[in-house]
């Protein structure tokens, strides 16, 4: 009869029971274990990364064949973490992890992995060295979860995730809003008390849901000038939201590429929350051009956006989608006088030969992180889409190092302290969209990013869902879901008014775009 012994291992006052054969030595012999001169393969790839000092445990799977596993986690101070497992799925104790990384802010974090084979021989892999940053990331992440789709949708929701734990909760589900489309959520300066999102179609109709310091309103942003609004950016003062309206068309390729998106028309406009008015200018809403993706500078003095000539400028005998390339523009805005300066081309498409999308300005105003892809303004569907970084002080730009992949990089958001970004990417499989976090150091360099940690690291392989429009916020969403649902179903719709001067400004503009 085979005899077994039960060992009790005390690790940081937490008992770990190991049932093992008397013929096998369970605890690694650190001095005599066989050395493997390479790093272990783990999933997700949590190697050589920089993590926030307030992130949830980076649980992982050891992809090395073995009968037993031992993981030693350490830093410069505090108690080490010891994990013994018969399976390769490594779950790091929450409290021990939080104590260790919070006490070692700005210091290295080491993962040492041992495996035992069927003969009882232990092997030790090269130590994994990660870095704990000195700066925290905003406490919560908000994203839309949808299924892979083309035209139709059924179930989607907006979710609030606590980044220091794995707590995730929906605060908007379209199943409670007439199965509508909910999209383009946004926050004022990372403030979870001030947010908006669009509700489209379904039983509740099309409107903007605005939550502002405890009040929730349903607003119809359509006017005689514009259809309902789309992409958005809050002015730093919190009273104005810059929008684009977009007439979006989706198409499919018979061979090669899968699908594409282009705009038939688009303009940029402003919505004033206090006066409930829509206004714009020929400088940002010209009928000769299509303007989109507005983004305010942190001081509110400049409005950045992307612009390309209208479709009528292209040869109609050949589908123009691959010729549609957007420039990065900016314009001075005087909020006090509600007046505009002169347009400035920040980065013309002719210079790079590529198309600009999703310009996002760092909180200090020194950098613009944006996507460049072959054509159009929807980089999520373009595998070649990569991040580029422009220094606003020198106007020089370059392909961002360390954060790009061979798959599409897309929507992104800066943290409130400017040291972190969250972004959407189709790595590693090219099919689904995942949320990744990356550190941006004081020298203007990105570090290797990592996937959003999950309690069960297999989640990213087994759940078929897409993380869409990740936005960092500095606290949990406290708006009651019931208030958002009531607002969506309400017949009390606030109708936005068009600024009377808009019609006069647009007189004499070239025809072409259908408003």
Image (cartoon, rainbow, N blue to C red):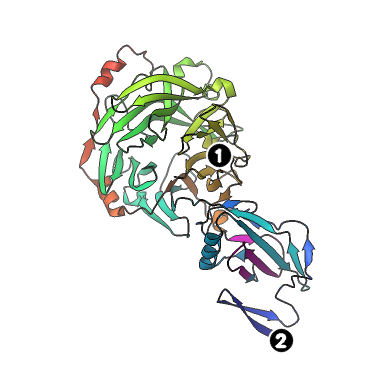
Residue located 43% across and 28% down the image: 304
In the foreground, 264 or 274:
274
Numbered mark located on residue 3 in the image:
2
Residue shown at 76% from the left, 72% from the top: 118
Q: Check contact, mark 2 vs mark 1: CB within 8 A.
A: no
For the N terminus, which image quadrant?
bottom right
| Nearest the eye: 49 or 358 | 49
What secondary structure is marked by label 1? strand
Q: Nearer the viewer, residue 511 or 434?
A: 434
Q: Can I make out residue 400 in this image?
A: yes
Q: Residue at x 65, y 61 (%)?
A: 111
Q: Position of residue 55 (x, y in %)?
A: 51, 56
Magenta includes 66? yes
Counting from the top left corner in percent of width and height, residue 212 is at: 28, 45
Residue 88 is left or right of residue 253, and the answer is right
Residue at x 55%, y 54% (from the top left corner): 460
User: Which quarter of the picture shows residue 33?
Assistant: bottom right
Image: magenta residue range? 59-83
Q: Is residue 151 above or below residue 43?
A: above
Kindly identify which numbered label has been placed on residue 409: 1
Q: Is residue 512 inside the magenta stretch?
A: no
Counting other residues with Cα less than 10 Å from the Cα at mark 1, is it few (<14), some (14-19), or many (20 or more)?
many
Q: Residues under labels 2 and 1: Cα distance? A: 55 Å
- Most extreme residue toward the top, as rendered? 508
Label drawn at residue 73: none
Which picture quadrant has residue 91?
Answer: bottom right
Q: Position of residue 373 (x, y in %)?
A: 56, 31
Among the two numbered marks 2 and 1 on one chain, the one whose residue lies closer to the N terminus: 2
Residue 339 higher or lower than 466, as above or below: above
């Amino acid at each position: 009869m085979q005899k077994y012994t039960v060992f009790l291992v005390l690790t940081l006052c937490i008992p770990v029971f190991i049932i093992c054969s008397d013929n096998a030595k369970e605890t690694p012999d650190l001095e005599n274990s066989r050395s493997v001169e390479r790093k272990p393969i783990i999933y997700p790839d949590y190697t050589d990364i920089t993590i926030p000092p307030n992130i949830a445990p980076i649980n992982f799977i050891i992809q090395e064949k073995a009968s037993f596993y031992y993981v030693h986690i350490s830093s410069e101070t505090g108690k080490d973490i010891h994990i013994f497992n018969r399976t390769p799925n490594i779950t790091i104790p929450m409290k021990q992890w939080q104590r260790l990384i919070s006490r070692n802010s700005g210091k290295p974090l080491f993962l040492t992995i041992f495996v035992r084979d069927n003969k009882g021989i232990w092997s030790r892999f090269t130590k994994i060295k990660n870095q704990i940053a000195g700066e925290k990331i905003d406490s919560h992440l908000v994203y839309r979860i949808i299924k892979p789709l083309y035209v139709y949708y059924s179930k989607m929701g907006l979710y609030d995730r606590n980044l220091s734990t794995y707590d995730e909760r929906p605060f908007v589900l379209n199943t409670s809003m007439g199965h509508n489309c909910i999209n383009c959520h946004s926050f004022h300066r990372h403030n979870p008390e001030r947010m908006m999102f669009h509700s489209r179609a379904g039983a509740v109709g099309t409107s903007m849901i605005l939550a502002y310091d405890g009040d929730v309103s349903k607003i119809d942003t359509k006017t005689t000038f514009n259809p309902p609004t789309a992409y958005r950016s809050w002015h730093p003062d919190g009273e104005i939201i810059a929008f684009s309206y977009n007439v979006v068309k989706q198409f499919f390729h018979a061979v090669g590429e899968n699908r594409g998106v282009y705009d038939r028309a688009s303009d940029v406009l402003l919505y004033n929350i206090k006066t409930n008015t829509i206004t714009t200018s020929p400088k940002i809403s010209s009928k000769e051009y299509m303007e989109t993706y507005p983004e305010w500078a942190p001081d509110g003095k400049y409005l950045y956006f992307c612009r390309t000539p209208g479709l009528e400028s292209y040869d109609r005998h050949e589908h123009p989608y691959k010729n549609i390339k957007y420039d990065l523009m900016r314009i001075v805005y005087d909020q006090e006088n509600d007046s505009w300066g002169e347009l400035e081309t920040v980065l013309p498409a002719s210079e790079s030969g590529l198309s600009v999308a999703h310009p996002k300005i760092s909180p200090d105003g020194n950098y613009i992180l944006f996507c460049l892809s072959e054509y159009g303004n929807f980089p999520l569907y373009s595998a070649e889409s990569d991040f580029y970084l422009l220094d606003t002080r020198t106007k020089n730009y370059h392909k961002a190092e360390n954060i790009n992949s061979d798959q599409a990089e897309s929507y992104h958001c800066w943290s409130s302290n400017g040291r972190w970004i969250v972004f959407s990417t189709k790595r590693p499989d090219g099919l689904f969209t995942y949320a990744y976090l990356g550190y941006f150091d004081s020298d203007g360099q990105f570090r290797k990013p990592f996937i959003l940690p999950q309690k069960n690291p297999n989640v990213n392989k087994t759940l078929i869902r897409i993380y869409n429009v990740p936005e960092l916020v500095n606290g949990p969403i406290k708006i009651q879901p019931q208030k958002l649902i009531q607002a969506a179903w309400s017949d009390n719709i606030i109708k936005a008014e068009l600024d009377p001067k808009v019609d006069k400004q647009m007189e004499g503009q070239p025809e072409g775009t259908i408003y």
